Amino acid sequence: MSHTTPPANSPVPIDHSTCLNEAQRQAVESLDGPVLVLAGAGTGKTRVLTTRLVNILQRQLAWPSQILSVTFTNKAALEMRHRVEKLMQNPVEGLWLGTFHSLCARILRRHAELVNRTPDFTILDTDDQLRLIKQISKSENIDEKKLPPRMILGKISRWKDKGLAPAKVTNVEYDQILIVYKIYQERLQVLNAVDFGDLLLLCLELFTNHPDVLAIYQDRFRYVLVDEYQDTNVAQYLWLRLLTQKNHNICCVGDDDQSIYGWRGAEVTNILKFEKDFPNATVVRLEQNYRSSHHILGAASGLIAHNRGRLGKTLWTDKKESSGDRVHVCGVSDGREEARWVGDEIENLQRHGTDVSDVAILIRATFQTREFEECFIRLGLPYRVIGGARFYERREIRDAMAYLRIVAQPHDSLAFERVLNTPRRGLGDSTLQNLHVCAREQRIPLLKAAMQLIQTDNVKGRARSSLIQFIQDIERWHSQVLQKKPSELLQIILDESGYTTMWMKDKAPDAPGRLENLKELVRALDDYDSLHAFLEHVSLVMDNNRAHHAGGISIMTMHSAKGLEFDTVFLAGWEEGLFPHARSLADSANAGLEEERRLAYVGLTRAKRQAYISFAGMRHIHGKWQTSIPSRFLNELPKEHTVIRSQSFLDQGTTHLQVESSHGFDDPWD
DNA sequence: CGATAGTTGCTTTTT
DNA sequence: GCAACTATCG
């Protein structure tokens, strides 16, 4: 067969015959009732979903705005829209296409008053959340050693993932955390803010408490489509169930073997019990893989077969055994050598005509990017880090963002607090305490409290004049929000507040870099006409697609590689402790291990033609050298699909890797 | 209040 | 190896 999989970003007309048999095709195209497409990696799940979407549009069964399509990332949503428009040969206006979070935010803003917010509520990020939790912990006299804020936040987030508001939590075991949860929710309401979990939780509450509102959306969305269903959590499941109760036209696609977000509250059980939850559901199973070569598929299948508790699929391909090489496994001495080996291999591929933008390096943890970056810069290889060290999480960017927030939304107390004394203007802890007391007593935002305090003489001396100045500044900038372009306004704020000066005077080695980043932010703001649009974009999308259009080798975590495919894939750092990660083994029997194995499966199946796996004998972690032993996953790869390659230091004595492979891969230092 | 030096603890993965 | 917190002094 001459079937070839088109690159993810170049849509082609859908060839139904290659993806689906006749019965399956009918199920997908009949468009009536619930459908679950259960399929393995590389079987074209997203294409099936697109087919259905285009079918609905072409048959004009529904207006675009009557279709709700949920994808896992905003990037995937954009891509899907792009494909649909290509196939429809027209822009499609009004289609509701996005992530659960962005779609919920859209609904919530329309009914904000019903969840005790105003339509311009702020969406908090992790940093803001932690700050709040810390404040509450302190005022409740909770020992941060025994109950770290991170852990409290984690627990609260899990509750939200399950759709549990404080009143619904029954687990007495965590009574202290529950108290914090209650206060936290109250504080969010006062702040006119929501966090990520709230977007779903509040939307769920909105639907349950206001049947009239729910009815609007049930009528509106005649068709609902969901991608990556195995990664939905309970809240998302409940949300979908409410929405589809009327029309029952839900179509989900997913693969239980690719469920890798359990730590974030995703429930594989959602996909396992689909038929029970949506009666009369048609289940379509796709098992022919169109992506990977024979050996890659064999290696991945052999690996995932070690998991219990899966629906069980046998992926097959009609690609010939000769169509590709075995998976190469290579041991190296340390992280630096690993990077050099990968760099050498890529240069080799380049010489044989491979385009490096078809090559990806997939890693377990983000710190692994560094050595590859250093090496590729030295070799002059073009690369891009995807996800990685996030731009919007850097301190200077967050400070600048806080300035924009307080100027755009004067009630945003968290932003106010962040920049009150940044740069230093003599408004320290005591002034802040003062403001907090005043704000809490009258239930007003900090900025309002500040305005009141300067009318009285509760604040004296230098602090007083500083505060007056600061308030005047904010008011002036606020009055310019609609007049100036967002990028100009930011430049004005940064200069007038003394923020730029602060970093220019700073003699720390990273200060110039931070100034660069601020410039970059001003540049990014140029693409937006409204400050509010930008702030919404940042809180929901958060991804940094600056490097998006540049080609080059992609470096990313296996988690962010989900849904993508590459000609050649390097999987680095297959060592016990790193992959499977030590922390994932600690909890819940072998559930953590199985999720790691699924992650390995996801990683391997990203490759179309060639996969390389490497492991290092030592790694430089936390400034200390640590020896490591090869990952157990290496032993689980069927031997007939792998080939072991040795590298420099291993050359002399390490053919024993092969000889003793019945015992597995030994620690090269043994 | 702010600057500085010293101390801790941490890094799994992300919408 | 770094960032974020803490103690101490001016």
Image: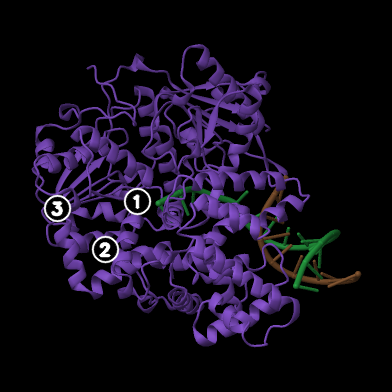
Chain colours: A purple, B green, C brown
Tell which tag, 1 or 3, sits nearer the viewer: 3
Residue A617's image quarter? top right
Secondary structure of residue under mark 3: loop
Secondary structure of residue under mark 2: helix
Expressed as whole percent of the image width and height from the top left, the position of residue A596 reads 45, 45
Query: Pointer 1 indicates a residue of which chain?
Result: A
> In the image, is residue A531 above or below residue A416?
above
In primary-sequence order, the first of circles 3 and 2 is 2
Name the residue rendered at 33%, 52% in the picture.
A99
The residue closer to the viewer here, A529 or A449, is A529
Residue A249: mark: 3
Quadrant the N terminus of chain A occupies: top left
Expressed as whole percent of the image width and height from the top left, the position of residue A238 reads 26, 63
Residue A231: mark: 1
Name the residue rendered at 67%, 18% in the picture.
A652
Name the residue rendered at 28%, 21% in the picture.
A4
